[in-house]
Every structure is written in structure tokens, then in C-alpha cells.
Image: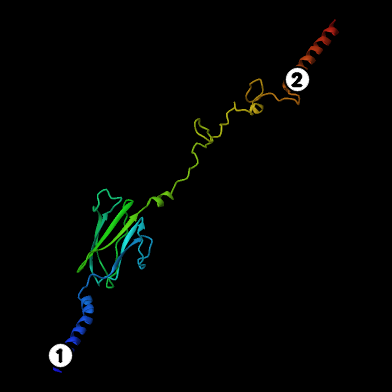
Amino acid sequence: MRTLNRVGALSAVAAAALLSAPAAAHATAPGDNGTVKIHDASTGEELRRNEPHVCEFYLDAFGFDSVQQVSWHIEAWAPTAAVKGETVESGAITLDDEGHGRTTDMTLPDGHYKLFWNFEGEKGAAKHKVFWTDCEDEEEGGGTTATPSASASPSGTPGESGGEPSASPSAPGEAAASPSPQGGGEGDLAETGNGAPVGLLSAAAAALLGAGGYLVFRRRRA
């Protein structure tokens, strides 16, 4: 009977130890908690989704231990890495009281990369994430439009498209506005309705009157 009691007691102790072991292990293994995400620079840091295709981005950590020290680095990764495992970016961060923190925004040349996230007191392997950077699509949306040619000036300089011809006297359609055929400048004689100069007609009339008067004078003397 005593043997059965002892066996029962030992069994109860062993069962209690097994049940409490996970909780004790959890309590004594700080540092292996939490997760880290890749976030586009425009994504709010409160969101916990991972974004593996980004251009400008930052690293966002959740659920780690309070005020935990973190060091991280990013390596170039296949298939785009010229040298696999080459560190292309690194840094350190201290998380807040709730085990949350974020890095500053950063950019990398288009390609494939892997993040390694190490932290103070970690018991297992570093947290890690693979991701792609691709800024080409964003740059394609910023094409420039053709600006009007500066040659569309009134001077109409030769070789410049869109220029208006200069208002020179030899331009077609301006002959009617040119001076009279005598080539005189200012003070040109006025013209009658049929195009004959008024001054010339007046002079001819005066000459005829003078000649007539002279003939009359001679006839009277004769």
C-alpha cells in the first residue's frame, strides 16, 4: 500500500513538472519573440503585413522584448546578386517598451535581398526576410512632355521651327502698301481715282493755259 502511495506521489510530481515545463521555458527564453516586416515607405508602421516588393522601404519590428537591442544587416541574394552574401546595408536599433521599432527609410538598387535581424538575448537563429526592390516602374511614370520650341518668336530666325516671317517690305502681299512707282518717300503726289497723280494733271493744265495765253497774245499783236 505504501509503495502504491509513493508511486502515485511521484507520478503526480512528474506530471506537474511536465505541465509547468513549457511555461518555465517560455519565461526563461527572452529574445526569441517577435517578428520583423519589410514595409513600403508609404505603409503605416502599425500594420503587420509583409511587403516583399518595394522601392523605398523600412524595417518594422513587432512583439519583441521591451527595450531590446537589435542589430541587422541586408545581403545581396540570388538570383540577382553578383556576389551572394555581400552585405549591402546594416544598422542597429533599440526597440520601445512594447518591443516595437522601425528603421529609417532606405533604398537599394533593383534586385533580390535577404534581411538578417539579430537581437540581444536571442536563443535561436536570427529573424530573416527575403524581398525584392524594383523602382523601375515608378520611374517610368515620370516621363517628361515635349515643351514648345523657343523658336516660335516673331523674328522667325532661319532654322527655328514655328517662327513667324518677319514683316519685311519684300514680303508677299505688301506691294499694294508700298510707296508710289516714282519711288518717292515722304511728300509723294496724291493719286486720282484712276491712278493718275493729281499734281501732274495740274501742271499739264497750267502748261496748256500758258500756251493758250501766249498764242492769244501773239495774235493780238499781229
Secondary structure under tag 1 reads helix
Quadrant containing the N terminus in the rendered view: bottom left
Establish if 55 lies above or below 15: above
Dividing the image into 4 quarters, which one contains the C terminus? top right
**What residue is shown with label 2?**
201
Whole-percent x, y for residue 195 in the image: 73, 23
| 3D distance between C-alphas at marks 2 and 1 | 157 Å
Q: In the shown orientation, is residue 96 left or right of residue 157?
A: left
Query: Height in image: 88 above or below 186?
Result: below
Residue that appears at 47% across and 45% down: 145
Count the marks.
2
Residue at image coords 38%, 63%: 43
Please state which amino acid type lies under the numbered disc 1: Arg
Q: Pointer 1: residues within 10 angstroms few (<14), some, or many (20+)?
A: few
Left/right of residue 72 with respect to residue 183 in the rendered view: left
Front one among 119 and 58 = 119
Q: Amino acid at mark 2?
A: Leu
What mark, if any, has residue 66 been given in the picture? none
Q: Nearer the viewer, residue 120 or 84?
A: 84
Residue at left offset 80%, top offset 10%: 214
Which badge, 2 or 1, comes first in the chain's sequence?
Answer: 1
Q: Where does residue 218 sit, x and y in percent of width and height?
A: 82, 7
To which residue does mark 1 refer? Answer: 6
- Furthest residue toward top: 222
Residue positioned most to the bottom:
1
Q: Give residue 221's position: percent from left, percent from top.
A: 84, 6
Bin the neighbour count of mark 2 within 10 Å (Cα to Cα): few under 14, some 14-19, many 20 and up: few
Which quadrant of the structure image shows residue 42? Answer: bottom left
